[in-house]
Amino acid sequence: MKKLEIIVREEKFAAVIEVLEDSGIGGVTVTDAVGFGRHRNGLQPKKKIDIYVDEFQLEKTVDLVRQVAATGVTGDGKIAIVALDNLIKIRTGEDGATAI
């Protein structure tokens, strides 16, 4: 299992969420964020999307986000792929991939 931490431009957020909903992934968590990158162009508003995926969903999910979020201009965002030891669904107690 992996956790994807995705930072995207606010203007690309709706398109990213739409493609993720259509892809059939388990769910997302969204946070408003601000930040700057290497070019130090001041704090810019962004959206942070957290997603838990199983290994078989990883490449497809990353590819979909990159296709939709990319503008080719500095500040398009980042995708961090973080390994998960376990995931537990609070309501049912399910763990591992079934908790996604």
Image: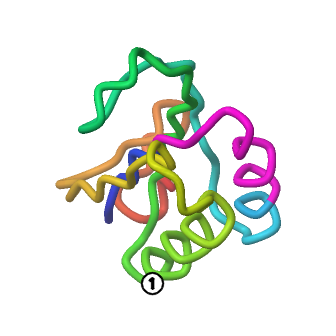
Determine if the magenta segment contains residue 13: yes
Q: Quadrant of residue 2?
A: bottom left
Determine if the magenta segment contains residue 37: no
The residue pinned by badge 1 equals 56
Q: Give me the residue at 17% from left, 54% from top.
A: 85
Q: How many marks?
A: 1
Looking at the rendered image, the quarter that the N terminus falls into is: bottom left
> Residue 44 placed where, x, y %?
50, 21
Q: How is the image coloured?
A: rainbow
Please give left or right for residue 70 compared with residue 39 in the image: right
Mark 1 crowd level (few <14, some 14–19, many ≥20, 10 Å Cα) = few
> Residue 53 placed where, x, y %?
46, 63
Main structural element of the magenta stretch: helix, strand or loop? helix
- Which of the pair 42/77 is nearer the observer? 42
Q: Quadrant of residue 8?
A: top right
Q: Give me the residue at 82% from left, 67% from top.
A: 22
Please give left or right for residue 23 compared with residue 87 in the image: right
> Residue 21 placed where, x, y %?
78, 58
Q: Give me the residue at 29% from left, 26% from top.
A: 40
- Which of the pair 8/91 is nearer the observer? 8
Task: State which region is magenta.
Answer: 7-18
Please give left or right for residue 33 compared with residue 42 in the image: right
Q: Give me the residue at 54% from left, 81% from top.
A: 60
| Mark 1 residue type | Phe
- Which of the pair 56/95 is nearer the observer? 56
- Please determine whether, in this image, residue 64 is positioned above or below residue 46: below
> Residue 46 placed where, x, y %?
55, 28
Element class at badge 1: helix
- Please determine whether, in this image, residue 48 is positioned above or below residue 73: above
- Which of the pair 12/90 is nearer the observer? 12
